[in-house]
Image (cartoon, rainbow, N blue to C red):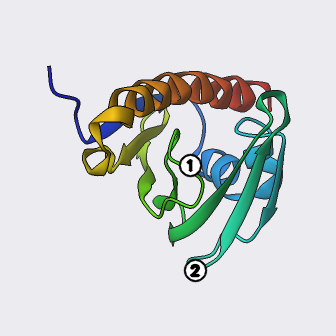
Amino acid sequence: MPIPNAITRTLDLAHRQEKVWDALTTLDGITGWFGSHADGEFKPGHDVRMRWEQHDMEATLAIQVVDPMSVFAYSWGINGAPEGDPRRTYVEFALEPTAGGTRLTVTESGFAQLPDEWLEKSYEGNTEGWRAELDELVAYLDAA
């Protein structure tokens, strides 16, 4: 079975858009669920540097879109790529109000550009990563 170009997950959250937006686009919010440390600015053209101490991992989020309460997007390096590889995937968080709170759709795209030797590992690793990270987002929102 061919591997798709994108990973998409949709969550119906029982929280206001403002609360979800703050969890995605503030340093305090994003470190509450996505990483152990972050610094930088959530503005297009700027970078946010993330660190996951428990995994001894770092990543740079190159901020692409900040449309308040609606769309937040960044590009970042590909899991498993050699150091310095210029290819990136694009991650988009789209929010829309619902009667019970907020629908959040997360899409990471750009896997089709990967060579066969890393495609499956990268795609499956990120699919599992988003499952875990979004579970942490739900727990963070529910506890806040």
Amino acid type of the residue that numbered disc 2 sits on in the rendered structure: Gly
**Does 46 sit above or below residue 16?**
below
Q: Identify which residue is drawn at 48% across, 32% down.
A: 126
Residue 8 in view of the camera: no
Judging depth in this view, the residue of 30 and 13 nearest the camera is 30
- Identify whether 114 is placed above or below 11: below
Residue 11 horizontal/vertical position (percent): 44, 29
Residue type at mark 1 is Gln
The mark closer to the camera, 1 or 2, is: 2
The answer to whether any part of residue 73 appears in the image is yes
Q: Is residue 26 left or right of residue 112?
A: right
* Element at label 1: helix
Mark 2 residue crowding within 10 angstroms, few (<14) / some (14–19) / many (20+):
few
Farthest residue toward the bottom? 45
What residue sits 74% from the left and 30% below the top? 140
Residue at the spot of label 2? 45
Report the residue marked by disc 1.
17
Quarter of the image with the C terminus is top right
Q: In which quadrant of the rendered image does the N terminus lie?
A: top left
Q: From the top left corner, tell me how far across and down residue 75 is, in percent.
A: 49, 60
Sequence-wise, the earlier of marks 1 and 2 is: 1
> Residue drawn at (83%, 28%), measured in percent from left and top?
54
Number of marks in the image?
2
Q: Residue at x 38, y 31 (%)?
A: 123
Q: Secondary structure at mark 2?
A: loop
Distance from disc 1 to disc 2, alpha carbons, whole Å, reads 24 Å
Q: Give the camera-side residue of 75 and 33.
A: 75
Task: Using residue 92 as the reference point, say whether residue 37 is left or right of it.
Answer: right
Give the residue at the far left of this rendering.
Answer: 1
Say if 143 sits above or below 115 in the image. Answer: above
Picture coordinates of residue 35 (x, y %)?
A: 76, 40
